[in-house]
Amino acid sequence: SQTIHQWPATLVQPVGSPLSLECTVEGTSNPNLYWYRQAAGRGLQLLFYSVGIGQISSEVPQNLSASRPQDRQFILSSKKLLLSDSGFYLCAWSDVGARGYTFGSGTRLTVV
Amino acid sequence: GDSVTQMEGPVTLSEEAFLTINCTYTATGYPSLFWYVQYPGEGLQLLLKATKADDKGSNKGFEATYRKETTSFHLEKGSVQVSDSAVYFCALVASIQGAQKLVFGQGTRLTINP
């Protein structure tokens, strides 16, 4: 069966520090991968998606970047965090036909 | 672009009350529709879905019917429990270059009191 792992679960980082959040998927090949963010009191917003290794598309301009170095690995990064980067970050995957769309357990990031 | 509008919360009900959370959408064509639930401190779980007009999705006593004529997908439950307390998100799937993204409503926080 397919599983999705996301870590860390919580993170407190100072302003200006770098960020790396990792997401891996097991039990499937060539998944579509996504990073969403949920800011406090708001819904979820798609940040990045990837349809293959090295292929990254950004939905909104921001202080973050994403990379897909392997088929089932998706990384969210920042060189210098801002206070506004605080939020709940969710990784997700879907198969090509979007028959299923599965979320990871999320990372709660607090920038102080 | 595609969008989802959800009933604003928070919603507070007593146990065994009837629940309705309204959801309407704007989209090109007839996208699949979803309800996701987020329990405190957790990620999102799929609650139910419907893929075409007049489909009814159901799970754990919750139901929602895909209404093309009113572009709605309201969530209902006949008798809520304390364990249903969570944030509920309505969503549709939209095609983007080679992938599919979920477009979410803003979420509705539901609290059930014993």
Image (cartoon, helix red, strand yellow):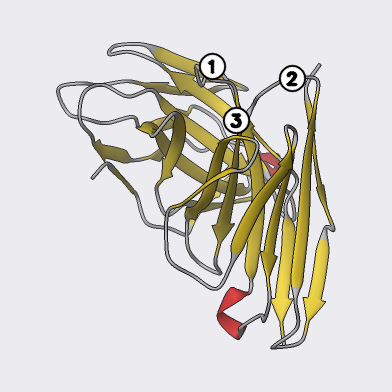
Q: Amino acid at mark 2?
A: Thr
Q: Which chain is home to disc 1? A: A
Placement of the N terminus of chain A among the 4 image quadrants? top right
Q: Nearer the viewer, mark 3 or mark 1?
A: 1
**Residue for point 66% across, 80% down:** A81
Residue that carries the numbered disc 3 in the rendered image: B46
- Give me the C-alpha separation between circle 3 and circle 1: 12 Å
Residue B110, compared with residue A109, is above or below; it is: above
Residue that carries the numbered disc 2 in the rendered image: A28
Q: Which chain is home to disc 2? A: A
Same chain shared by disc 3 and disc 1: no
Q: Amino acid at mark 1?
A: Arg
Residue A54, compared with residue B59, is above or below; it is: below
**Local crowd size for mark 2, using a 10 Å CA cut-off: few (<14), some (14–19), many (≥20):** some
Q: Residue furthest front?
A: A54
Q: Which chain is home to disc 3? A: B
The answer to whether mark 3 and mark 1 are in CB contact below 8 A is no
**Local crowd size for mark 3, using a 10 Å CA cut-off: few (<14), some (14–19), many (≥20):** some
> Looking at the rendered structure, which numbered label has been put on residue A99?
1
Q: Amino acid at mark 3?
A: Leu
